[in-house]
Amino acid sequence: MIYDRVRDLPITIEGVSLERLELSVSPDFTRVTTVVHLSGDGHDGVGEDVTYEIQDHDALHAVGLPDMRGEWTLQSLSRMLDGTDLFPAPPVREPSRDYRRWAVESAALDLGLRQAGDPLWRVLGEDPAPVEFVISIGLGDPPDIERVLAWHRAMPDLGFKLDATASWTREIAQTLADEVEVEVVDLKGLYENTPVDQGADAGLYALVAEEFPHAWIEDPRLTDATRVALAGAESRITWDAPIHSVDDITGAPVVPRTINIKPSRCGSVERLFACYDHVRAHDMGAYGGGQYELGPGRGHIQYLASLFHPDAPNDTAPVQYHRPPEPGRPTSPLTPTPSATGFRWESGV
């Protein structure tokens, strides 16, 4: 089991600190994340809390994380976190608990590896490989296809993961299918009470299945009507939002051929590595997902994609892709750049 290779990693924590990152994406969206720093024995380990609600970050910075100083193994620290509430006040959304847990555990993994003088890839026995990536983007409301075409003109070889909405027309879908490489269409049918919620729209689902016959279809909300709309495309259904553990993979309403594994959704290193074990044992595919990371968390998902699913439509584009198209950006595939020690991808941002 992959986790067995790191579970007994010793970690000395002497200090805990937080760093706020912020990016104004649009007049309606400011992205805030928090970098968790765990320090000890002259080393610093980092992880990134990708919780979306700004008030949850504000509350964390006002109070701080619980005292984690001491001698640990990765396993013993994780067991301590099982019984620890990392939120001073209940989060706006429950999945944020896993996001913050991942920030702490990934920082601890980074710190322990740096203290041991080893890089993650060597400890796991997995060689880094160049990482294929796509850019995840929506067309807005009303849909503006120029958002995608501008990227395509700037970077003709770039693949896309597109957020489909009920406002899409067949003309829009056909133009996208003809002009760009659409590798994943995200229906966002399983989010609730978020700005990106999409209902179970059978017409949209049928349109996506017909016009993008080679794309993965992510997170449909399955009803009698949408199952009919997706008839014949079941093998292309994949899941993202509900996947936090192996149990979520095996309990999915359609068992996927490939799956979107987001480390931050899994929360703990143990649950994440169990998902990789499951995928390999059952000859499944996987691709990585981003959470609009602004700092070291982006490098973490690129690092893991490099080890476990490098040749997939990974939503792990460098942070520069959060801004409009411009020359000089890294292109796919990303050259492996693991740090000499730790869990750090040197070109992650």
Image (tube, rainbow, N blue to C red):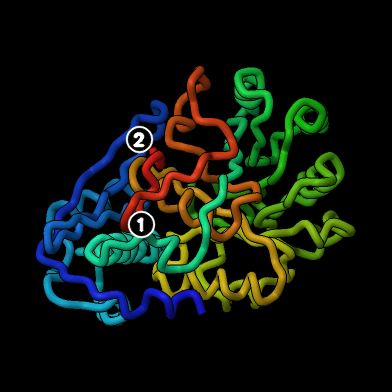
Percent of width and height locating residue 218 = 67, 54
Local secondary structure at mark 1: loop
The label shown at residue 30 is 2
Q: Residue at 27%, 62% (x, y): give it.
A: 117
Question: Left or right of 19: which side holds 250?
Answer: right
Question: Left or right of 54: which side holds 250?
Answer: right
Give whichever of discs 1 and 2 has the lower sequence position: 2
Q: Residue at 15%, 59% (x, y): give it.
A: 39
Q: Can residue 91 be seen in this view?
A: no
Q: How many numbered marks have been drawn onto this rendered protein structure?
A: 2
Q: Residue at 32%, 80% (x, y): give it.
A: 8
Give the quarter of the image for residue 174: top right
The label shown at residue 343 is 1
Percent of width and height locating residue 69 = 12, 71
The Cα atoms of the two marked residues, 1 and 2, are separated by 27 Å
Q: Answer yes or no: do the residues labelled 1 and 2 have beta carbons within 8 Å?
A: no
The residue under label 1 is which amino acid type?
Answer: Phe
Give the quarter of the image for residue 78: bottom left
Percent of width and height locating residue 123 = 41, 68
Question: Left or right of 170: which side holds 11?
Answer: left
The residue under label 2 is which amino acid type?
Answer: Thr
